[in-house]
């Protein structure tokens, strides 16, 4: 019996109620069944790295304080966290590698289904890699860029070159700390080596390697994924669309894409407009084809094609509960295996596509970039053929959907915020310097059944914008904000402080800017770098009045993101603490001492409003250090000194 979702959007509430009434088990039910969850695991003090274990440390100090090998709570917790970073970094970066391979294929084969869509961006990346562009064919440049990007993963000497785009002060600091990433794969492998039995036992040293791998993700693998996706699929520009389950239609073939990589979903977005396929759908009695997305692949095709968002991570099963999804196609990451049993309760076909991600008993149509259009067509035809199997008596599509604006990037936000100045961050920096804006915050990340669904995201974001803090968002927070109407310019007049309202009115932007998928957190790193470069707000990212948050985090990828953000010098707030509270020393290091090293640190706070206040307090501390003017308008939140 699924619980009542107090803060969720109405569509989710309706579908959860339906699941409960029809006795269909979904994620919240499985979460309840799992209670009580393992206390040792939550505290990060169980270890099963070798076969002398599993070992667990007694958190009350009465039982064993070391494992069979002598590893204590600090070592065990740090190793567990580092392995989470390795998992998260590997996921983002393997995605980046696949995009680089696709770019190489497009560059070599003139008949390839993928083309270079953003030549300017390609040339900008070529400059990072010192690749000559003048007088050269675009495909030659693309080939060299793809090869240079692929080099980043496994080079044996040197540093990740993409990371050289960070502010110079930051690079110097990373080199000094020994955390400048060398090669993306190498750092992940080194985590696995250092954390195997009998290697690194110094918790700070283990975390430093974790940060090096995380930096290889944020400033390497994820950045490559974002930049090369812009080259191949086109850089996003602000556009309008809709979000929530109400975007599904009773009278069309409904196809949902879910997962992360845009290689397949972008082609499906294009092929779904094919006249022949639409005619085929009509032959089967449908009025056309509706395509919508879940999770980050949704964000990818929203940003570039305006394809509507069906929902966030926790809505993947709820979309199926409408009984109106003819096919859900998934690739990699955040795809719950539980989808298959929900699909079995309806006519919905679930199709896996990646050789890296199969689910037993689920149809698999293997995706190959070489045959992208052919396979996308086959998937859509399978959906069309399944439409007549839909039982209209079982269809219940919630009415709810919301308008949104998405498609902001480090470059397009640049033009937008430039206003009449265009192509400059000056007005943004000036707004912060003069106190019209308090600062900026990135609120990102997953939703998690261990949290009151959507409460963390929405309450935090509203509290930040109320206090004149511009919010940028990606991933499932972006989907949640969209569903709750926060990605509309009008939201500024309802929820934002007076200063932020003025900016939104002048420039015509929402108070919350959607910057894309999880790998697109790299766009936020670029924005921060550009703010520093514009001047007037210090010499490094750690000087800026900014903060980051993932209130309802779930994935290992969120841990990797958090660590590259902390290593980049940013105060990083999450709801549930990292699973390491069984180590007092590690807790102290990550929430206090690390600030002296990187300028960033972790903070954990379950109450989303209190969490926002802690972020605002940090922003104010940075404003004070920069000797910025007092805020122009009265602030709702006034920290006690
Ligand atoms: Fe136990 Fe040490 Fe082996 Fe971990 S590495 S399972 S703590 S003996
Ligand atoms: S999809 S990683 S649930 S944000 Fe990127 Fe959402 Fe988190 Fe997956």
Image (cartoon, rainbow, N blue to C red):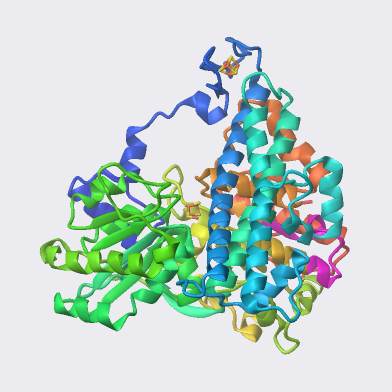
Quarter in which the N terminus is drawn: top left
Q: In this view of the protein, which residue sits in the foreground, 319 or 99? A: 99
Give the residue drawn at x 85%, y 58%: 168
Please state the quadrant of the image where ligand 1 appears.
Answer: top right
The residue furthest bottom is 420
In x, y percent, where is residue 306? 45, 76
Give the residue drawn at x 18%, y 64%: 386
Give the residue drawn at x 68%, y 32%: 587
Give the residue drawn at x 23%, y 71%: 253
Q: In this view of the protein, which residue sits in the foreground, 90 or 508? A: 90
Quadrant assignment, res 291: bottom left
Please give the range of residues in magenta.
531-547
Q: Is residue 520 visible?
A: no
- Height in image: 254 above or below 197? below
- Residue 157 in magenta stretch: no
Q: In this view of the protein, which residue sits in the foreground, 224 or 300? A: 224
- Height in image: 267 above or below 317? below
- Residue 535 in magenta stretch: yes
In x, y percent, where is residue 186? 67, 41
In x, y percent, where is residue 361? 25, 44
């Amino acid at each position: 019996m699924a619980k009542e979702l107090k803060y969720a959007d109405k569509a989710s509430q309706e579908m959860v109620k339906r699941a409960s009434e029809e006795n269909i088990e979904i994620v919240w039910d499985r979460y309840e069944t799992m209670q009580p969850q393992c206390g040792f695991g939550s505290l990060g003090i169980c270890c099963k790295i070798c076969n002398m274990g599993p070992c667990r440390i007694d958190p009350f100090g009465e039982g064993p304080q070391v494992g069979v090998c002598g590893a204590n709570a600090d070592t065990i917790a740090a190793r567990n966290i580092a392995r989470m970073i390795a998992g998260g970094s590997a996921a983002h970066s393997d995605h980046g590698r696949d995009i680089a391979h696709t770019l190489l294929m497009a560059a070599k084969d003139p008949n390839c289904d993928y083309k270079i869509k953003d030549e300017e961006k390609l040339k900008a990346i070529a400059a990072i890699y010192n690749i000559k562009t003048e007088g050269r064919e675009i495909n030659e440049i693309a080939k060299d860029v793809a090869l240079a990007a692929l080099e980043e993963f496994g080079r044996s000497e040197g540093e990740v070159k993409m990371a050289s785009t960070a502010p110079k002060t930051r690079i110097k600091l990373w080199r000094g700390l020994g955390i400048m990433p060398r090669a993306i794969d190498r750092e992940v492998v080194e985590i696995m080596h250092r954390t195997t039995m009998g290697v690194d036992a110094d918790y700070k040293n283990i975390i430093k390697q974790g940060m090096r791998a995380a930096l290889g993700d944020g400033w390497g693998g994820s950045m490559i994924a974002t930049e090369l996706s812009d080259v191949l699929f086109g850089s996003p520009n602000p556009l309008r669309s809709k979000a929530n389950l109400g975007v599904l239609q009773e009278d069309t073939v409904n196809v949902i894409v879910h997962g992360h990589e845009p290689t397949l979903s972008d082609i499906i977005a294009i092929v779904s407009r094919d006249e022949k396929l639409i005619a085929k759908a009509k032959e089967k009695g449908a009025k056309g084809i509706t395509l919508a997305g879940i999770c980050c692949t949704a964000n990818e095709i929203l940003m570039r094609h305006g394809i509507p968002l069906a929902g966030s991570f926790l809505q993947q099963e709820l979309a199926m509960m409408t009984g109106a999804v003819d096919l859900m196609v998934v690739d990699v990451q955040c795809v719950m295996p539980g989808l298959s049993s929900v699909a079995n309760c309806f006519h919905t076909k679930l199709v896996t596509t990646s050789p890296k991600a199969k689910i037993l008993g689920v149809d698999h149509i293997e995706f190959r970039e070489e045959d992208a259009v052919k396979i996308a067509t086959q998937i859509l035809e399978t959906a069309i053929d399944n439409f007549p199997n839909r039982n209209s008596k079982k269809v219940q599509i919630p009415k709810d959907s919301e308008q949104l604006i998405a498609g902001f990037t480090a470059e397009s936000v640049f033009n937008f915020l430039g206003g009449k100045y265009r192509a400059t961050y000056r007005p943004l920096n000036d707004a912060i310097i003069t106190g019209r804006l308090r600062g900026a915050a990135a609120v990102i990340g997953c939703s998690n059944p261990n949290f009151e669904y959507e409460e963390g995201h929405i309450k935090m974001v509203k509290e930040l914008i109320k206090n004149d803090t511009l919010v940028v968002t990606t991933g499932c927070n972006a989907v949640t904000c969209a569903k709750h109407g926060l990605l509309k310019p009008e939201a500024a007049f309802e929820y934002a402080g007076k200063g932020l309202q003025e900016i939104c009115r002048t420039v015509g932007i929402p108070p919350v800017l959607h910057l894309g998928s999880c790998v697109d957190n790299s766009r936020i790193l670029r924005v921060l770098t550009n703010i520093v470069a514009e001047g007037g707000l210090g010499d490094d990212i750690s000087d800026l009045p900014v903060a980051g948050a993932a209130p309802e985090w779930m994935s290992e990828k969120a841990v990797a993101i958090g660590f590259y953000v902390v290593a980049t010098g940013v105060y990083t707030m999450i709801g549930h603490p990292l699973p390491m509270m069984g180590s007092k020393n590690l807790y102290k290091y990550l929430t206090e001492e690390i600030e002296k090293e990187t300028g960033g640190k972790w903070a954990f706070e379950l109450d989303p409003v209190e969490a926002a206040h802690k972020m605002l307090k940090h922003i104010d501390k940075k404003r004070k250090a920069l000797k910025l003017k007092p805020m122009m308008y009265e602030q709702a939140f006034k920290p006690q000194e």
